[in-house]
Amino acid sequence: MRNKDRARYMIGFVILFALLFLLLVWNMNEGSVKLSFSEVLHILFSHDNQSIKGHIIWEIRLPRLIAAMVLGGALAVSGFLLQTFFSNPIAGPFVLGISSGAKMVVAMVMIVSLSRGLVVHSVTMVIAAFAGSLLSMAFILIICGVMIGYICSAITEFVITFADDSNIVNLHNWSLGSFSGISWENVGIMTVIVTLSMVFAFLLSKPMSAYQLGETYARNMGVNIKVLRFELIFLSSILSACVTAFAGPISFVGIAVPHLIKNLFRTSKPIVMVPAGFLGGAVFCMLCDLIARTAFAPTELSISSVTAVFGAPIVIWIMLHRDRR
């Protein structure tokens, strides 16, 4: 690695960590109840979760903040893995319909469980979302991802039509996409799933680098193409499924963030893109969640509405840039 590249990567990571810290502090302070930096520090270090302000930090803002970090990073890495698999810069879990497949199966599980008075556990949600993701991915490889997204959305709406009114409210709030209502149990489960997936994705950096240079080159380097493709599908599906299970479908993060990170670091090397993409996704979703909470407070916007506002123009620019090239 050249010294110039090493310096650029170091600067890029410093920028991402600085933004991450800034948004951590900002998200802790801002909300319907504004807190000063000193108050937040006192609550955190004293482990005060009994007072009203302590409850707000420990039970509402902190779990939500960690969820935005973990799930935002997961979406960005999932998008990068899909872009590597398809060799397409506009491939992503939302555009390809993977998120829609996860949403469809989770909606069915929620309706069946809630109609019988059963509580849907977080692990059940993740398994259902993963099954939906794999189902969509199987059809994507055969037909067309955009059409799969429309079909899954249509089935979801059909199922919701015949659900009870109380179930419809729960499904409607979840289907819009939001990091609100995240519990510490949810945080623990999503962190374990995403961390393990990130480790495996990072370990695939070398074969992915070879794959980016072409299948023939990758085979000559000893890469098993079929196994690598399965691993990319599996990891991207489980990452996007985890996001959908806990926060609902979130649009454009998986496309926009990898592109922004590639421009910042001026590289598409997986060994850089996997950790940098995770940090970029965390920063992007933390910023969007802050806007969703505070822009029209006390009314809260859906996270997908905000990510679409920032992400859609980036996707349009990518498509126009490709056409010019």
Image (spheres, rainbow, N blue to C red):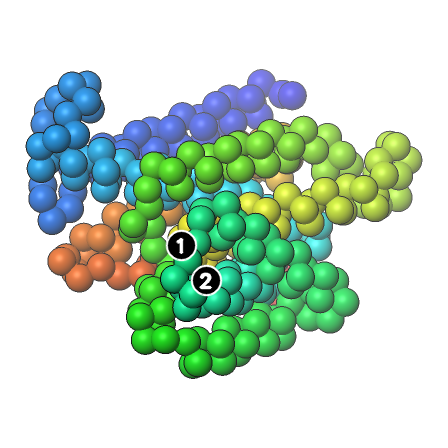
- Mark 1 surroundings within 10 Å by alpha-carbon count, few (fewer than 14), some (14 through 19), many (20 or more): few
Nearest to the observer: residue 223 or residue 262 = 223
Percent coordinates x, y for residue 88 in the rendering:
66, 56
Percent coordinates x, y for residue 132 in the rendering:
60, 60
- Mark 2 surroundings within 10 Å by alpha-carbon count, few (fewer than 14), some (14 through 19), many (20 or more): some
Task: Write down the residue under mark 1.
Answer: 119
- Quadrant location, the C terminus: bottom right
Total numbered labels: 2
Q: Is residue 228 left or right of residue 280?
A: right
305 in relation to 13, above or below: below
Circle 2/circle 1 CB separation < 8 Å? yes
At 65% from the left edge and 63% from the top edge, which residue is drawn?
A: 136
210 in relation to 305, above or below: above
- On the image, which quarter does residue 311 sit in? bottom left
At 70% from the left edge and 33% from the top edge, which residue is drawn?
A: 204
Task: Write down the residue under mark 2.
Answer: 113
- Quadrant location, the N terminus: top right
Nearest to the observer: residue 57 or residue 93 = 57
